[in-house]
Image (spheres, rainbow, N blue to C red):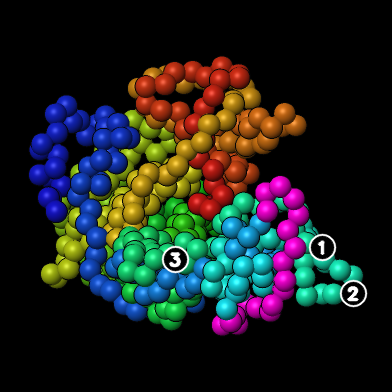
C-alpha cells in the first residue's frame, strides 16, 4: 500500500486545514491495508467474524427435488383440464424417506413437506385442494381442474445451491443466516481472518476514571467506554490503556506500548491546538502522521497515519476529545478503516431518506451530523426530528437519538418537510 505522504502528494487542492469529509475518507481508504492471519473456528464462534476465503458448496441444496408442502405428488400430464381428475394413491413418503416404487399413469403418492419427489412426479397438489374419491375408499383422491399447474409446489434439486458453486465470499462478515447456511452444507468449521487488535486510551490531565474523586475542573472519562462499546460491536480484540496524562514522556511510552501490541491505535483528545496537546508532537515523532481540520461538525480536529516502534507499526486514529465528536469521527472514519483492516467488505454506511420535522440551519461547505429521532407516522411516512442542542459535549443526545441526520458538504439549510439523509443507529451503536 502507498504511504500516507505518497497519497497526499498526489492530491490536487489538498489543504490539511480544510479537508472535506469525502477526501479524508478516501485518503484513509487508500492507505489502510488488511492485516494478515487466518484461523479456523467452529461455526458457533464465527458470528461477526470475517470470512477468509470463498466457501464452495460441496453438495446440492436441496439434494433432490422435494415437496414444498403436504399434499399429493402427481405427474402434471395426468391432470385433466376440463374436469376433476381421480388418481389412485399408491403410497406415502415422508421427509427423510423415499418412494422407490414405479408410478404409473393415473396414480399419485401422498407426500409430506420436504420429502423427495418420486420418479415421474413433477407437481404437488396441496392437501386442502383435494378430497377423497370415495368416503369408504382412502386409496383414491379427487383433484379439481385448474387448482395447480405443472411444476407447482416442487423445490428443484440445487435450487438453493448447486454443488461446486460459491455459497459465501471472502470478506463477508458472517451473520446468523450465514451460520445456518454453513451448517446446511455440513461445515463444522470455517476459515476467518484473525481478530484485529486495537489499543485505545484517553489523554488529558482533567480526566478521571470511574471510582476516583472528581476534583474541581475535572470530568469522568466517558470516551473509553463509548470506544469500548463501538470496538466490541466490531468484534475487535481490545486493549484499554486507560487515561494518559498530558506529559510528553508518558505519551511517548503509551504510543510505543500501543504500537508494539496492536494493529491500530485510537486516542481521544490532544489533536487540537492547545498548549498541552503533546499528542501531535509524539505522533509526528513516531511515524507518518497528518493532522487535519476536517470540514465537519462535530469533530473538526483529527489525526491519521501510521506509527512505528521497535520494528512494529500500527495505524493511528487521533480523535477529538469531546464525547459526541469521538463517536462521530469513529463511525465515519475509523470504523470503515478498521473493517478494511479486518479484510471485510468496506462498503460505506447505508443511508436512508426521511422527512425533516423542522427546519435545520446549515451553511454549505462542511458536513454536519446531527442527532435525530426517527418515527413512522400513521400515514406510514418516516419523519426525523433533531434531539435538541447539538453541542459536541452533549453525550446524552447520542443516548436519546436513534439515528444521525447527515447534512452533506454542499447542502444548505433544510426546511420543514424537506427530505434528508439518515443513518440508523440500530445494528450500528
Q: Image quadrant of residue 155? A: bottom right
Q: What stretch is highlighted in magenta?
A: 80-101
Q: Is residue 22 magenta?
A: no
> At 14% from the left edge and 33% from the top edge, which residue is drawn?
11
Tell me which residue sits at (66%, 70%) in the image: 107
**Do the numbered discs 2 and 1 sit on residues whose CB atoms are within 8 Å?**
no
Label 2 to label 3, Cα distance in Å?
Answer: 41 Å
Q: Is mark 1 on a helix, strand or loop?
A: strand
- Label 2 residue SS: loop
Q: Specify whether residue 200 is in view.
A: no
x and y, in percent, of residue 417 in the image: 61, 19
222 relative to 168 in the view: left or right: right
Instruction: Tell me where residue 214 appears, x and y as whole percent.
Output: 55, 57
**Residue marked by disc 2:** 136
| Residue 7, placed above or below residue 141 | above
Q: Which of marks 3 and 1 is nearer the N terminus?
A: 1
- Is 325 situated above or below 388? below
Rendering coords of residue 180 (x, y %): 51, 70
For label 1, the residue is 131
Name the residue: 47% across, 61% down: 159
Q: How many marks?
A: 3
Query: For residue 90: magenta?
Result: yes
Q: In which quarter of the image is the N terminus?
A: bottom left
Quarter of the image holding residue 13?
top left
Q: 223 left or right of 191?
A: right
Q: Disc 3 versus disc 1: distance between alpha carbons?
A: 32 Å
Query: Distance of mark 2 from mark 1, alpha carbons?
Result: 12 Å
* Rendering coords of residue 267 (x, y %): 35, 55
Labels 2, 3: front one? 2
**Labels 3 and 1 touching (C-beta < 8 A):** no
Instruction: Work out whether residue 134 can be spotted.
Output: yes
Amino acid at each position: 500500500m502507498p504511504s500516507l505522504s505518497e497519497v497526499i502528494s498526489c492530491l490536487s487542492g489538498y489543504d490539511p486545514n480544510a479537508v472535506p469529509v469525502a477526501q479524508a475518507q478516501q485518503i484513509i481508504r487508500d492507505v489502510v491495508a488488511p492485516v494478515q492471519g487466518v484461523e479456523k473456528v467452529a461455526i458457533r464462534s464465527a458470528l461477526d467474524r470475517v470470512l477468509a476465503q470463498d466457501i464452495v458448496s460441496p453438495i446440492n441444496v436441496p439434494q433432490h427435488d422435494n415437496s414444498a408442502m403436504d399434499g399429493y405428488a402427481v405427474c402434471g400430464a395426468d391432470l385433466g383440464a376440463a374436469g376433476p381428475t381421480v388418481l389412485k394413491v399408491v403410497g406415502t413418503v415422508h421427509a427423510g424417506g423415499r418412494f422407490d416404487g414405479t408410478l404409473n399413469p393415473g396414480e399419485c403418492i401422498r407426500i409430506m413437506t420436504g420429502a423427495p419427489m418420486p420418479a415421474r412426479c413433477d407437481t404437488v397438489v396441496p392437501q386442502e385442494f383435494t378430497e377423497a374419491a370415495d368416503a369408504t375408499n382412502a386409496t383414491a383422491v379427487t383433484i379439481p381442474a385448474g387448482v395447480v399447474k405443472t411444476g407447482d409446489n416442487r423445490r428443484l434439486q440445487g435450487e438453493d445451491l448447486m454443488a461446486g458453486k460459491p455459497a459465501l465470499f471472502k470478506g463477508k462478515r458472517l451473520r446468523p443466516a450465514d451460520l445456518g447456511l454453513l451448517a446446511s452444507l455440513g461445515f463444522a468449521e470455517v476459515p476467518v481472518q484473525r481478530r484485529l487488535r486495537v489499543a485505545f486510551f484517553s489523554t488529558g490531565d482533567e480526566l478521571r476514571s470511574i471510582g476516583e474523586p472528581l476534583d474541581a475542573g475535572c470530568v469522568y472519562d466517558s470516551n473509553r467506554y463509548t470506544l469500548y462499546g463501538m470496538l466490541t460491536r466490531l468484534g475487535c480484540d481490545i486493549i484499554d490503556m486507560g487515561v494518559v496524562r498530558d506529559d510528553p514522556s508518558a505519551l511517548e511510552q503509551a504510543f510505543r506500548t500501543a504500537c508494539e501490541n496492536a494493529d491500530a491505535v485510537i486516542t481521544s483528545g490532544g489533536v487540537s491546538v492547545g498548549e498541552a496537546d503533546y499528542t501531535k508532537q509524539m505522533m509526528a515523532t513516531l511515524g507518518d502522521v497528518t493532522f487535519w481540520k476536517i470540514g465537519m461538525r462535530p469533530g473538526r480536529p483529527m489525526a491519521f497515519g501510521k506509527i512505528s516502534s521497535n520494528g512494529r507499526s500500527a495505524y493511528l486514529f487521533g480523535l477529538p476529545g469531546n464525547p459526541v465528536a469521538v463517536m462521530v469521527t469513529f463511525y465515519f472514519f475509523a470504523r470503515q478503516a478498521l473493517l478494511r483492516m479486518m479484510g471485510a467488505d468496506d462498503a460505506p454506511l447505508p443511508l436512508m431518506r426521511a422527512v425533516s420535522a423542522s427546519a435545520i440551519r446549515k451553511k454549505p461547505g462542511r458536513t454536519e451530523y446531527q442527532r435525530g429521532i426517527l418515527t413512522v407516522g400513521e400515514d406510514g411516512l418516516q419523519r426525523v426530528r433533531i434531539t435538541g442542542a447539538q453541542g459536541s459535549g452533549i453525550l446524552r443526545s447520542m443516548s436519546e437519538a436513534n439515528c444521525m441526520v447527515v447534512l452533506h458538504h454542499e447542502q444548505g439549510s433544510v426546511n420543514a418537510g424537506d427530505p434528508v439523509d439518515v443513518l440508523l443507529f440500530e445494528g450500528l451503536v
